[in-house]
């Protein structure tokens, strides 16, 4: 198995700004929010194989069957081993825009949250609402299950065709809104946007307030 990465090894936005690895941008991309120092301590943007993260929960980009597939879904099932599929088989699938939680089995992550993002060209104008639903439900499941660290793969931005920039705006705004609700920020230590491709990481850094 590839080397694992623990929470301590994943830099927050605050640290990246301090080390000047990223600089506050004049061009705020598509963001409608201002930066928040408190939230910058809780957010990370990385480019990494999500199956290597030794944290509380990772979010899989699944399909409605929840029975595995290609992309990040395939990578997660391969790394977790057959126990994951066995548990998924008991879940009776999942609706687009929602998510379900399982154990992590042989993964270094304790839990896997399986979110079903929209197929961009199929859902059209409903895509943003459905993608936002995936992020929100995943955060709720994390909190309900005592997971204090959660890493999202870039849901729907692979074979489901969601453009990276638009998807990162929905993800960032949904997470921000959730963390600003009363008591929610205390329940989560870290929310990690875990990208695989440079284009997706670039989209996050462009759209982060
Ligand atoms: N770690 C992190 N991110 C990854 C990894 C990895 N190991 N591998 C790929 N990605 P996709 P979707 C990124 O296609 O668009 C599956 O067959 C990838 O670069 O995996 O939501 C499911 O079963 C991209 O940015 O998911 C569904 O049928 C992101 O993960 C369908 O694909 C999501 O790409 C879901 O499509």
Image (cartoon, rainbow, N blue to C red):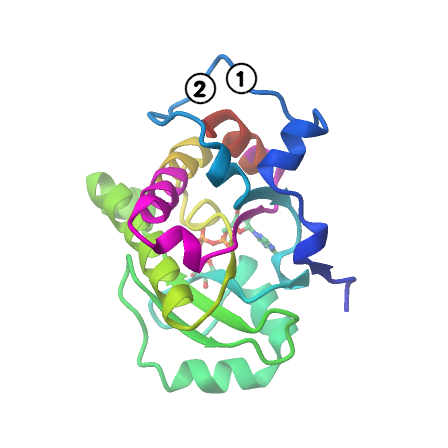
Taking the image as shown, residue 148 lies to the left or right of residue 122, namely right
Residue 74 position, x and y percent, is 56, 66
- Residue 117 visible? The answer is no
- The spot of residue 23 in percent (x, y) is 62, 21
Residue identifier under label 2: 28
Residue 122 colored in magenta in the image:
no
Residue 157: quarter of image:
top left
Residue drawn 62% across the image and 43% down it: 46
Name the spot of residue 50 as percent of width and height, x first.
Answer: 61, 57
- Residue at the left extreme of this rendering: 125
State the extent of the magenta-drawn residues as a range. 171-199
Given contact means CB atoms under 8 Å apart, are the residues at marks 1 and 2 in contact? yes
Quarter of the image where the N terminus is located: bottom right
Is residue 194 positioned above or below 32 on the image?
A: below
Q: Is residue 80 left or right of residue 29?
A: right
Question: What is the quadrant of the C terminus in the image?
Answer: top left
Give me the disc on residue 92.
none
- Residue 144 seen: yes
Q: Residue at x 43, y 55 (%)?
A: 186
């Amino acid at each position: 198995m590839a080397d694992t990465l623990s929470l301590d090894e994943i830099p927050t936005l605050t640290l990246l700004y301090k080390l000047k690895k990223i600089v506050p941008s004049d061009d705020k991309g598509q963001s409608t929010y201002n930066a928040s120092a408190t939230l910058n301590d809780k957010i990370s943007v990385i480019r990494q194989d999500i199956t290597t993260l030794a944290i509380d929960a990772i979010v899989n980009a699944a399909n409605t069957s929840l029975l595995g597939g290609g992309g990040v879904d395939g990578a997660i099932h391969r790394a977790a081993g057959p126990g994951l599929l066995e548990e998924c088989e008991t879940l009776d699938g999942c609706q687009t825009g929602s998510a379900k939680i399982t154990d992590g089995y042989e993964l270094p992550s304790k839990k896997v949250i399986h979110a079903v993002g929209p197929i961009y060209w199929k859902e059209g104008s409903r895509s943003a609402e459905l993608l936002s639903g995936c992020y929100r439900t995943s955060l709720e499941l994390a909190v309900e299950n005592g997971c204090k660290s959660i890493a999202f793969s870039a849901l729907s931005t692979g074979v489901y065709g969601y453009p990276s920039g638009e998807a990162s705006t929905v993800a960032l705004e949904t997470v921000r809104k959730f963390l600003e609700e009363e008591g929610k920020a205390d329940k989560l230590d870290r929310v990690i946007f875990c990208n695989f491709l440079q284009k997706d990481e670039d989209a996050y850094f462009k759209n982060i307030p």
